[in-house]
Image: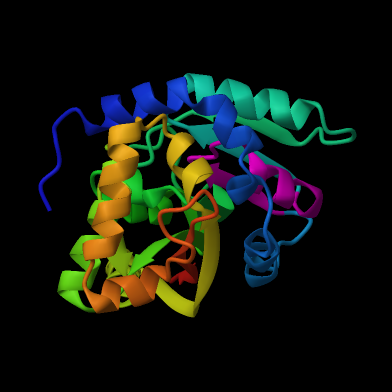
Amino acid sequence: MPHPPDSKALSQARYTRFAEGYVTSETHAKGSDLDRLLAIAGPQPHWQALDIATGGGHTALKFAPHVAHVLASDLTPRMLDQARQFISERNGVTNVSFEEADAENLPFGDDRFDLVTCRIAPHHFPDAQQFLRECARVLKGGGLLVLQDQVLPADEEAARCVDAFERLRDPSHNRAFNAREWEGMCQAAGFAVEHSEQYVKRHDFLPWARRQGVDDATIERLIQMMREAPAIAREWMDPRDWATDAATFVNRHILIRGRLG
C-alpha cells in the first residue's frame, strides 16, 4: 500500500503533540495484554531487552523487573521524554535506559539483545518487513521477538474498511495486516513463529477518537463509516450503543512470539 514520503515526520509530529495522552491512556497503560506479552516471552533475569516504539513506556516498565536491562527506544523525542518521566516515577526501577531510534534503521549493533518487544506500533511503520529485518539483526541467535499490533480480517473488503476507520482517526496510521500476513513477514525475516494468538480490546469510542485530537466533523464521519461498513467489518469491530455518548467498539490485536533461527 503506498504511503506518503513524510509518513515518519507525520508520526513524529502527531506523537509529539499527543505524547502525554498516550502515557495516561488506559488502552496502552493497562490491560491483560501486557500480562499476556510477559507470559508469552518468558523473560530471564540475565536478558538484555529492547523495546521498540516504546510510546509511554508501559511495555518497558512491565518487563524491567524480569530482565537485566531494558533499552526503551522511540522515534519521537517527546514521546521518549514522557516515557522516561513515567518510568522514573516508579520506585525501584533502575534498569531502563532510553534512546531515540527509527524502528526500520535501528542504531544498535548486531547480535546485541536476547529479547525485542514492540507493542501496538508497527501499523505506523512505512515498511513493516524492514522493521522485522532490523529486529532479526539486533537479536542474538535464538533470541525472541514478541510483538503486538492491530490485526485485520482476512476478507479484503472488510480489511480495507477497518484500516480506513483507523486511518481517518489517525492519519499517521500506515496499515495493519492480517494474521497470515504477519506470520509470513516474520518467517521471511528469519523468525520461526512459535506462538500466535488474537486479543480483543474494547474501546470507548469518543475517548479513543479524541486522543488523536479529531474534530467534531471527523467524529461524524467515523460514526457514518461504521454505519455503512460491510457486515464482516461491523462484526469484526462489534460496535455497541453506536452514535451515542456510550458508544464502544473493538479492535483486534495479534500477539506473536518469533524465535530467530
In the image as oriented, which residue stretches furthest toward the right?
92
Q: How many marks?
A: 0
Residue 222: say if magenta: no
Q: Give whichever of 198, 251 is nearer the camera.
A: 251
Image spot of residue 31 (x, y percent): 67, 58
In the displayed structure, would residue 139 be above or below residue 103?
below
Left or right relative to 10: residue 103 = right
Dividing the picture into quarters, in which one does residue 234 lie? bottom left
Image spot of residue 181 (x, y percent): 27, 71
Left or right relative to 229: residue 60 = right
Which residue lies at the image location 57% right of the left edge and 31% below the top edge? 21
Q: Is residue 157 visible?
A: yes
Q: Quadrant of the C terminus?
A: bottom left
The region drawn magenta spans 47-67
Which residue lies at the image location 48% right of the left edge and 26% below the top edge? 18
Left or right relative to 32: residue 235 = left
Which residue lies at the image location 29% right of the left edge and 38% below the top edge? 218
Left or right relative to 139: residue 126 = left
In the displayed structure, would residue 134 be above or below residue 81?
below
In the displayed structure, would residue 251 be above or below residue 209?
below
In the image as oriented, which residue stretches furthest toward the front?
244
Q: Give whichever of 60, 136 is nearer the camera.
A: 60
Which residue lies at the image location 17% right of the left edge and 73% below the top edge? 156
Image spot of residue 225 (x, y percent): 24, 56
Image spot of residue 101 (x, y percent): 43, 31
Q: Is residue 169 visible?
A: no
